[in-house]
Amino acid sequence: MKIIGISAYYHDSAVCLIEDGKIIFAAQEERFSRIKNDAAFPALAIKNCLEFTHTNLHDIDAIVYYEKPFLKLERIIKTYLKTAPKGFSSFLQAMHVWTKEKLFIKQNIIDELKKIDSSFNRKRTLLLFTEHHLSHAASAFYASSFEEAAILTIDGVGEYATTSLAYGNGNKIKTLHEIHFPHSIGLLYSAVTYFLGFKVNSDEYKVMGLAAYGNPESEETKKIIQTIEGKLITLNDDGSYQLNMKHFAFTHGLTMVDEKDWRELFKIDKRKNEDELNQSHCNLAYAFQKITEKVVLNLCYEIRQLTNSENLCLAGGVALNSVINGIIKDKNIFKNIFIQPASGDAGGALGCALVAYYSFFEKHRKIEFPDSMNNGLLGNSFSETEIKLITDNHAHFYKCENEDELCKKTAQLIADGKVIGWFQGCMEFGPRALGNRSILADARNPDMQLHLNLKIKNRESFRPFAPAVLEEDAPYYFEMQDTSPYMLQVHKVKEKHLKKLPDNYNQLSLKEKLYTVKSSIPAVTHVDMSARIQTVNKTQHPLFWKLINEFKSITGESLVINTSFNVKDEPIVCTPQDAYNCFVNTGMDILAIGNYIFYK
């Protein structure tokens, strides 16, 4: 049985193909359209999926959409009626979008599929719709190796739900409790994202990175936390919460908050995108991060008590907050945790397909170990012909005899201080590059973080970089005992690797903290002595493991910087040509595609 899942028309549209419960292909539309967080119907991703898997639409038994549009429309109308006459302009804008592409979504999907494959027969293929949060929950639970688990879904909003507590057992998922719009910890985090001058539904991770620069000892930070807890949000003993909607504008306006109101609350002006970041911005990010951590931990304790399960599955956009994930793990609330690597709306395409297979068709659940995500490597790969097109136009390259030579040469180049574009195998599904569409560099180099941010990625200098470390050596570097294959947990660097910091470190400015060498692996040590870690397993990711192991044999260090192969405001590269364009237009030194090494 073949099922296609689709997410579209909000942000991060994607497609997923499963066959008899096994994930065959999954990819976001942005990779093919080259539009960051593309929300359009994933026509290019579907075409690529069908071509890559040699599938026709008439082979598909069911096509599933990741949410129920009319429930969402009902919520929008009810929200307007509650806030009227405020919000008329935002309501008109929403209705314009709905009448254009969402109101007739069933027919739109059929029309789009016929454009892709004229053999598509609506009468033969079922068209199904699942609920948004069920899609998220399914993407995590059914992809995990757990027979049973507590499932926590937290995001901005689905149809009505913003936070869901559920329990999965076998092929069943039961919702235990929901928090409904407008009360949303995801939208609270998006509100501060907006106020700090970043892009909502895109740049929330920047707030997480900026939070580490906040000064927990300052009176300003303490006052901000008091204001949030006293005026913006109410936390309850059962893990639930309510927002004070007096201080938010997203129910009736075109912005997340009233800027004047928040300026009065926090004594901080809204930051414009081009404004330089200052300590007050850092303190604001820190405070909202801490409140979010508190809310999520409360929910974890509550769902642990409700389900009595030792296993936790996490999904929804908030599950991409790797700082929170690391804290949940360190608290030992659960014995085992699985976080869906594509926890945002893209993962809804996977989840809804799995809901159809296990719930609608009531198929027996097949559990894979360590999970069924194939290390996230679920997208397209490339052919020798595509590489040949690049060699025809680039004179300076070398073809390695085999993978061993490729890894030895590339590891030496990294040790020599070169920045490598590493393009191998199948593309990753989700927001993280996990060693197939990556930029790699030496974590020992104290200048490498700034060099990568400013000369390669063209992004904000405060942004941290992640280490990819051999799984067996991770406990040597970091305060962790478990694995983190999807780069979704933050843990502290072990004390033996840290340098002595100035006594007034917390009082230093953003730039002073940034320029302070904090450890023996400074390029991946964030300003709070933490790192967002990817553990690399020899069996699950053999080529990437081999490369890092070669680096270890040269330098004695078994980790490298791993960041996504893209520049600011562009999606991760998809094709060899994308990789080549990024290589020649940035300060990158080397490009490795397959067994070919390209030099500038």
Image (cartoon, rainbow, N blue to C red):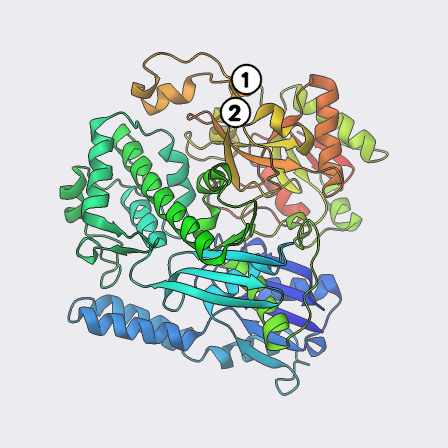
Q: Given the current orientation, which residue lies at the most extreme bottom position?
A: 123
CA gap, disc 1 to disc 2? 7 Å
Figure check: 547 above or below 26: above
Determine the image quadrant of residue 219. top left
Apparent side of residue 32 relative to residue 278 in the rendered image (left or right): right
- Dot 1: element: helix
Residue 287, position as x, y percentages in the image: 29, 37
Residue 497 is labelled as 1
Q: What's the residue at 44%, 58% (across, down)?
A: 306
**Residue 276 visible (yes or no):** no
Residue 493 is labelled as 2
Q: Are marks 1 and 2 in contact (CB under 8 Å)?
A: yes
Q: What's the residue at 33%, 45% (across, down)?
A: 193
Residue 411, position as x, y percentages in the image: 71, 26
Label 2 neighbourhood size at 10 Å, few (<14), some (14-19), many (20+)? many
Quadrant where the C terminus is found in the figure: top right
**What's the amino acid at mark 2?**
Val
Determine the image quadrant of residue 405. top right
- Dot 2: element: loop
Apparent side of residue 36 relative to residue 87 in the rendered image (left or right): right
Apparent side of residue 16 relative to residue 71 in the rendered image (left or right): right
**What's the amino acid at mark 1?**
His
